[in-house]
Image: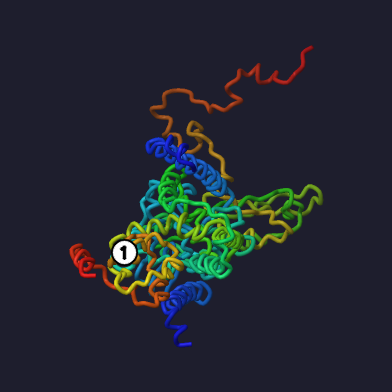
């Protein structure tokens, strides 16, 4: 049992943060808690600190409107947080859709759907196209375009304020990820993930690969939702620096050889070369 | 792909084709997406919270956080859910279910983080200080359906009049002789849009099965006279005549034709 917990320590931590954040928001709406009011688009922390989704605020800017100070400040706080610490941690530790896509991915692995399904390739850069498109459409239509279709906000808002037909969006993503494209939503399409990939490109917390310990079992690549970020596995010791890494820590957990660990990013390039030579 | 075929497709061609594919996919996606967004945006019959900016401005600013909804003590405001056929996530209210009770401190406006709800539009300056004045809000305007309002039948009902928080101003009663009975009066509710805030307490109180008085968005319900009609009996209005350049008329589709053409239209002279 202890081993199971240890082997899923980050997964458990993520579910705990995701669910407790949700409960705080729901509690604010139903029981009037004052800890975290609003939703992921924009909220109030302890009635003082404004928090806002910087991507949503940028879409509002694209419409040509100037948002008031609160949302602006909130967006800056969130941007700085993920820029400095988290990278795409939003995706794996906060976003509620992550639980849906992880479930689809888990079923995929358990039932070995990958081997049965005909694979089709889709670029992981679609998300950046969708992001660009969202700004163009926001400008053209005069409304934050992605916010009106976003399954992320729909799911979260739905859980806090009432779901309506939003179940359809969740079901679509689940089925799409399960039967159409592996990691289809989070890994290919979601522009919010793309946005956090960009702003978190140089964030501090990183997974680090220690090549000498690697036995090339490839368990990490099996479990990683963005496996292209693990291109260095078995090749050289370095930290996983690509912005697309969600810092979910699944690779760290499944690695039996202590070849992957969380660490603070090393900014000195020389250090990497040095270690490669050593090994 | 076999060697021969792939050798023909050089890198430049592949790049161009892939670019074209990407652009095409983005185009198709963008068109579908914009069609959907445009569709949900076009919901003119929606009542917004107090202080809401004009609909097109509101819809571009609203970040859909629900803070106004949480702040409302009467649960008046709701966030549009997918399937409501309204812009998803934006706040609105249905006065027949729960009207706006016009709280004097307007709790829903200050939490708005983006300024989609504009506190300036619902405040006045008093002794150099900005204070909220709920009477300034214009969420909509009440409209009476004379055919289904039972007061117009001669039945005494003043439910809407009594419910109105700005009684005798936003709704007043007009007395008219009931010729049918010869000895009774009609007490007819009349709405003055200058005072009506669109809170919907009248619609909420209306006794008929479907409300005979309804709150509609002002831009839907109200007309506009045009600048060149001058009230001759109003001195301040008559001042506008000074410096006028002559006769102006309202141009409509109908007035583009000559009078004879317009009057004879549709008559078969054969």
Residue lying at 74% horizontally and 59% vertically, measured from the top left = B209
> Where in the figure is residue B257, as x and y percent of width and height?
60, 20
At x 34% / y 70%, what residue is drawn? A49
Query: Residue A46, position in %: x, y?
Result: 38, 75
Front residue of this view, candidates A244 and B85: A244
Look at the numbered disc 1 and give the secondary structure of its residue: loop
**Label 1: few (<14), some (14–19) or many (≥20) C-alpha neighbours in 10 Å:** some
Q: Name the one closer to the observer, A232 or B175.
A: A232
Q: Quadrant of residue B155?
A: bottom right
Percent from the top left, x then y, of residue A50?
Answer: 36, 66
Count of all numbered marks drawn on residues in the image? 1
Which quarter of the image is occupied by the C terminus of chain B?
top right
Q: Residue furthest front?
A: B3
Left or right: B149 as drawn, with respect to A16: right
Q: In the picture, residue B63 is in which quadrant?
A: bottom left
* Residue furthest top as drawn: B270
Q: Is residue A35 above or below residue B230?
A: below
Q: Which residue is mark 1?
A: A235
Q: Is residue A14 visible?
A: yes
Subunit that carries the residue with mark 1:
A
Q: Which of the two residues, A202 or B58, is positioned nearer the viewer here?
A: A202
- Dividing the picture into quadrants, the one containing residue A57 is bottom left
Farthest residue in the right direction?
Answer: B181
Residue B235 in view: no
Q: Name the residue at 53% across, 38% down.
A: B224
């Amino acid at each position: 049992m202890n081993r199971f917990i240890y082997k899923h320590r980050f997964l458990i931590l993520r579910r705990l943060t995701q669910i407790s954040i949700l409960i705080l928001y729901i509690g604010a709406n139903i029981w009037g808690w004052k800890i975290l009011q609003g939703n992921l688009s924009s909220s109030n922390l302890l009635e003082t600190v404004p928090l806002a989704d910087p991507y949503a605020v940028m879409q509002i800017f694209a419409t040509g409107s100037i948002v008031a100070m609160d949302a602006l400040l909130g967006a800056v706080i969130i941007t700085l947080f993920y820029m400095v610490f988290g990278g795409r941690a939003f995706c794996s530790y906060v976003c509620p859709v992550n639980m849906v896509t992880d479930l689809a991915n888990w079923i995929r692995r358990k039932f070995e759907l990958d081997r049965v399904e005909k694979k089709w390739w889709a670029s992981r850069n679609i998300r950046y196209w969708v992001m660009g498109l969202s700004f163009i459409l926001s400008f053209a239509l005069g409304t934050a375009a992605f916010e009106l279709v976003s399954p992320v906000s729909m799911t979260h808002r739905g859980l806090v304020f009432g779901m309506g037909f939003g179940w359809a969006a969740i079901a679509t993503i689940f089925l799409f990820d399960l039967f159409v494209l592996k990691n289809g939503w989070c890994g290919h399409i979601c522009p919010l993930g793309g946005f956090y990939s960009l702003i978190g490109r140089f964030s501090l917390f990183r997974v680090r690969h220690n090549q000498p310990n690697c036995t090339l079992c490839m368990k990490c690549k099996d479990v990683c939702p963005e496996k292209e970020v693990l291109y260095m596995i078995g090749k050289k010791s370095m930290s996983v620096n690509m912005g697309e890494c969600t810092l979910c820590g699944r690779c760290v957990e499944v690695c039996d050889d202590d070849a992957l660990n969380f660490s603070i990013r090393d900014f000195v390039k020389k250090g990497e070369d040095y270690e490669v030579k050593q090994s | 792909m076999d060697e021969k075929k792939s050798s023909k497709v050089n890198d430049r061609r592949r790049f161009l084709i892939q670019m074209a594919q990407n652009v095409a996919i983005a185009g198709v996606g963008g068109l579908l997406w914009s069609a959907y967004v445009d569709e949900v945006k076009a919901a003119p019959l929606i009542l917004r919270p107090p202080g809401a900016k004009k609909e097109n401005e509101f819809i571009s600013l609203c970040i859909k956080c629900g803070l106004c909804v949480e702040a409302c003590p009467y649960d008046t405001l709701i966030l549009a859910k997918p399937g409501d056929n309204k812009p998803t996530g934006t706040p609105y209210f249905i006065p027949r279910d729960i009207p706006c009770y016009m709280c004097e401190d307007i709790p829903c406006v200050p939490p708005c983080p983006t300024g989609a709800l504009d506190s300036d539009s619902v405040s006045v300056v008093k002794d150099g200080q900005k204070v909220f004045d709920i009477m300034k809000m214009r969420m909509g305007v009440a409209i009476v359906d004379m055919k289904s309002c039972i007061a117009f039948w001669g039945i005494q009902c003043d439910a809407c009049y009594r419910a109105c928080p700005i009684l005798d101003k936003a709704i007043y009663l007009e007395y008219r002789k009931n010729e049918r009975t010869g000895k009774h009066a009609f007490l007819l509710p009349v709405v003055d849009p200058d005072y009506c805030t669109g809170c919907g307490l009248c619609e909420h109180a209306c006794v008929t099965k479907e409300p005979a008085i309804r709150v509609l968005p002002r831009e839907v319900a109200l007309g506009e006279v045009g600048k060149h009609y001058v009230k001759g009996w109003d001195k301040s209005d008559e001042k506008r005549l000074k410096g006028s350049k002559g006769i102006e008329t309202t141009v409509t589709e109908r007035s583009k034709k000559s009078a004879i053409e317009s009057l004879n239209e549709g008559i078969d002279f054969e």
